Amino acid sequence: MRKSKLFIRKFIVVIIGIVLCFTSLTACGNNPDDENPTDSLVFQKEASGTIKEVDQSNYVTFYFDAENGDDANNGSVRFPKKSLKEISRVAKEETERNEKPVRILLKRGSVFNGNLNLSVFYAEEEYPLIVGAYGDENDGYPVISGYGSETAINAAVSIKRGNIVFENIEITGKTAFQGIYVTPMVMGALKNVTIRNCYVHDINFNWEYDTKASETNPDEIDLEKVCPLYKSDGKSYGRYYYRYYGGIIFENNSKDYATWFEDIYIINNRVENVARTGIYVMNRWANRPGVGYGNNKYVSDSREFNNPLTKVGYYPHLNIVCNGNYVECAGGDAIVLSGIEDSFLDGNTSYYANFLGRVGFWNAGIWVFSARNTYMQYNEAAYTYKRNGAKDAQGFDIDNACSNVYVRYNYSHHNEGGGILVCNNKTNLVYYNADGTFRNGGKTELAMGKWENNYITSNVFAYNGSKADNKSSALITTARAVKDLYIDNNIIILDPEIEKQSVVHTEPDPEQVAENFNFANNIFYCKNPTSALFTASQLVSYKFFNNVFYNFSEEVKNYVGNENIFDFDPQIDDNGNVKGYDNVAVYRPKNKASFSKGKPYLYALRKDIAGEKVQTLGYVGAFSK
């Protein structure tokens, strides 16, 4: 029966490909994806998961006013309560006592000093606990001003249960370790958490300069004053050190039983000036080859062996939706999702990531780690710094142990480390049997992550790289063993002032190579003749189909193969400084040849980067017309 279903599925995919070819203006041929196993119907998935709006008409509401309230009050709008401690009590006791769901609203313009702990409350998926704001919107947000110390790693807001909507609140804390910190308290899945429309800023970030951080050169600040060092267990390190310190952090840090996240919505938040990570969803229960850490007893990538109590299995986070967030001046990474499946990074913006980069730290703008069946789309990553000894600094990254990751409809520009990183790694791992016994006597084995069948489609990469390091690539940097990457219908615009810049760069490692890279229907463009090169000694197998290389040297054309090049001017307006995702259409080619010279691609998207329906597959670049 399984073989019959698989045959039918493959037959349907083939029929779709034939239909696409015959309905295109150009004959189907030279398809670099003929043997690609990905189901085209999955690849057409366009939208992220949506939040089901809550009917709040049946809620019991408690009001809080930090200035004029009193905890002895009944919590009505006329007689509000006052303190964060009382919010924790109400969340716990009233959700247990009331037959109706509970809503807690904080007065706009009020400043609540201290940390809010939402550890125990009772709510249902249909009627979650709601923590939000009331009052005149002209008064701004209600503010929670939290704190931490050298002996207390505290978050301004801690959430430890599911079924909650936390929205419309400002969170800050110069000594806090996290702005909003979500972690499970009980075994199993923590589900249905929505963090939306919040403003999280200055978390463990001591800014005392006259200019805004985003307007300040990081080479001209005192990093230790912005993010001071402290002592812990006899070791000196910076609070910026761990990725799970930052703005909005999800971490399943239990050790005794398996926990994971499902149906998490991080929506339309603004995060500025945080010590390390803007938004991070971390997974400590999804160790597998290429990951290198985790509490689970790994059997395989299948979840069929999962037993949360015995720790056996593999526990990825499911349906993580990170949508519409703006992150500015993260000390390290802007947005990272790790240990995930069936998840989305949509419409986010990263500006000035890696702002506090240090020696020994690798940061990028927006990226995924150990991800499967995940979509990174409609995002803008720009101005990522590569200073003070920091590494990487690309706009985007498909990191270790990733498969079926779709990077599409994104705009990557002016990132000092390059356009996008693709990388993988070998890690030590102990294998287990389904009953929890050692598979190989507990022997540690070195295993390479599974990195394959990833896609970079319909994006714009512009002015990435740095004059200080011409190996910072205009398009892709690879590190270690990656394979089966499909790069199609992108526009890559080079900075003409960077001499001998890498277009694609592979980091040298003779034992680990990049294989089966397929470049189809892309536009590589420089407004002036460029000396750019492919410095890709570890790229051992690749194919180029129907790409435009304009103003490139004969050396590049020989590398690509002249027979695979369209040598015409696509006529792209390029002023070198286009900011904002909404302005990406400025790169639309004016030469009509750009919309007819391409070749059909079996897994082409239904829309282009401008959101326009693709009428024909015969185009090059990211715009179909």
Image: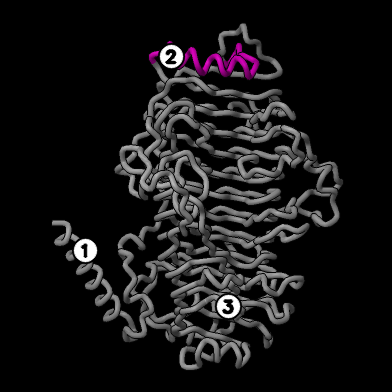
Q: Are marks 2 and 3 in contact (CB under 8 Å)?
A: no
CA separation, marks 3 and 1?
37 Å
Return the x and y of residue 602 as percentages of the image width and height.
33, 74
Return the x and y of residue 119 as percentages of the image width and height.
53, 22
Image: 26 above or below 376 = below
Any magenta on residue 92? yes
Return the x and y of residue 436 as percentages of the image width and height.
35, 38
Q: Is the residue marked by circle 1 packed among few (<14), some (14-19), or many (20+) residues within 10 Å?
A: few
Amino acid type, residue under disc 2 in the picture: Glu
Q: Image quarter for residue 152?
A: top right
Q: What span is colored magenta in the figure?
A: 77-99
Q: Residue furthest top?
A: 72
Q: Which colour scheme is used?
A: one colour
Observer able to see residue 263: no
Tag nearer the camera, 1 or 2: 1
Q: Name the residue under label 1.
A: 9
Observer able to see residue 577: yes
Q: Could you say whether the residue bearing mark 3 is in a helix, strand or loop?
A: loop
Amino acid type, residue under disc 1 in the picture: Arg
CA separation, marks 2 and 3?
61 Å
Q: Could you say whether the residue bearing mark 1 is in a helix, strand or loop?
A: helix
